[in-house]
Amino acid sequence: MYSFRPSPNHGPRPEGGRVELLILHYTGMPSADGALAWLCDERSQVSAHWFVHEDGRIVQTVDESRRAWHAGVSCWRGICDVNAHSIGVEIANPGHEFGYRPFPEPQIDAVIALCRGILSRHPIAPRDVLAHSDVAPTRKEDPGELFPWQRLAAEGIGLWAPATGIFSDESLCEGHSGPAVEQLQSSLVQFGYDAPVNGIFCAKTVAVVTAFQRHFRPSLVNGIADGATQRTVKNLLDEVDRLA
């Protein structure tokens, strides 16, 4: 089930570069074979530790002790060299540009098994099992709103909280400003996102809210922080506190 195809695109982790994050991607290319070949081509200057085909085959391309080049310019919970502190998993899917589609059952089963192994080897907290879009919200969409994050959380991989409880139903969107916007921004930063905290619902705030929705509230991804989105942020923070 596992095979090894080495990529030349990696380097040493810096001293003290402890693995704390698990980042899931989609390949975003027309074919899985083409994506894997590109990750293993020195001209690309990109790589990941693991690659999961749609039929469930798993390929390791970089040893987990090494720093793979998968996250690019990114940040989470103040960690702005994400590659130095993460394991990267590429999941074959054409992505939004080439015909985004649901992830097949064998592929998700394989992702779950792979992630369980990674979590057994590294001290990664549930809140730190992430989408590429979480750590790079202004640049990336992957693995997107069709990825079954809730199912992974039910299997003990990552965090999930539904939008329950009483909270303001007033939507916040681009152009809004004031204390409610600042509170939302502060909550997103507290959870881990690299968001401004200035009380202004700016373009970067839209990008962060959109990334949050892709992961934690995928039924409506529009960058508008409606009541359900705001409640989900609060409930996730409550869950983080519960697990602490």
Image (tube, grey):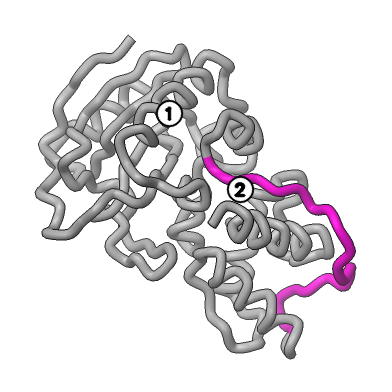
Residue type at mark 2 is His
Q: In which quarter of the image is the C terminus?
A: bottom right
Q: Is the magenta stretch mostly helix, strand or loop?
A: loop
Dot 1 corresponds to which residue? 116
Picture residue at 46% right of the left edge, 51% below the top: 128
Picture residue at 16% right of the left edge, 43% below the top: 66
Q: Which of marks 1 and 2 is nearer the N terminus?
A: 1
Q: What element carries label 2?
A: helix
Q: Work out whether 26 lies above or below 192.
A: above
Give percent across and percent down for residue 30: 43, 28
Q: Is mark 1 on a helix, strand or loop?
A: helix
- In this rendering, position of residue 109 left or right of residue 182: left
Residue type at mark 1 is Arg
Q: Distance between the residues labelled 1 and 2?
A: 19 Å
- Tag 1 near tag 2, CB within 8 Å: no
Give percent across and percent down for residue 9: 15, 41
Q: How many marks?
A: 2
Give percent across and percent down for residue 21: 37, 50
Dot 2 corresponds to which residue? 215
Pair 1/2: label in front:
1
Picture residue at 60% right of the left edge, 69% below the top: 188
Taking the magenta stretch, the answer to whether it contains residue 174 is yes
Magenta residues? Answer: 158-176
Picture residue at 27% right of the left edge, 62% below the top: 81
Q: Work out whether 212 lies above or below 32.
A: below
Q: Residues within 10 Å of mark 2 (few under 14, many from 20)?
A: many
